[in-house]
Structure formats: C-alpha cells, structure tokens
Image (spheres, rainbow, N blue to C red):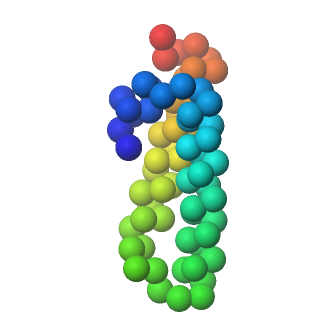
Amino acid sequence: MLASEIREMSDDDIRSRIEELERERFNLRFKAATAPLEDPMRVRVIRRDIARLKTVQRERSLGAGK
C-alpha cells in the first residue's frame, strides 16, 4: 500500500483498515507460534502498512498533510 493511496482514503477508511491489519497481524503471530508460516514476509508487510496508515492519520490530526 502506497502512501499516496492512503492519503486518498477517508479517515474512517484508514481507521477500519488499521483495525483489519492489526487483527490479521495478531492472528499471524499466533499461527507463527504454532507452525511455520506460508509467507513469513507478510508479517513485515502488515507492520509497515500499519505504520504508513498511522503516519498519515497522525499528519491529518496535526494538520500537516494539507
């Protein structure tokens, strides 16, 4: 997910996407504890997407993204 794509999303969409990715990351952590993951890089991708989403969310709250 690119930052430019995120900036086009509404605040509610960003919030819901963060929740969705957090849930997926949580589930992957449990799967990783019990068995090897099919795509271990997915955890890294999710973590970075969450960081990008939260960065844009924070920019908007500070008014810096305008």
The image shows residue 55 at horizontal and vertical percentages of: 53, 34
Of residues 20 and 30, the one drawn nearer to the viewer in this rendering: 20
Q: How many marks?
A: 0
Name the residue located 61 percent from the left edge and 41 percent from the top edge. Answer: 16
Name the residue located 42 percent from the left edge and 65 percent from the top edge. Answer: 42
- The answer to whether 18 is drawn above or below residue 12 in the figure is below
The image shows residue 9 at horizontal and vertical percentages of: 48, 28
Q: Quadrant of the N terminus?
A: top left
- The answer to whether 61 is drawn above or below residue 36 in the figure is above
The image shows residue 47 at horizontal and vertical percentages of: 50, 55
- The answer to whether 28 is drawn above or below residue 14 in the figure is below
For this view, does 53 lie left or right of residue 4?
right
- The answer to whether 26 is drawn above or below residue 60 in the figure is below
Name the residue located 52 percent from the left edge and 15 percent from the top edge. Answer: 64
For this view, does 50 lie left or right of residue 23?
left
The image shows residue 46 at horizontal and vertical percentages of: 48, 56
Name the residue located 43 percent from the left edge and 25 percent from the top edge. Answer: 8
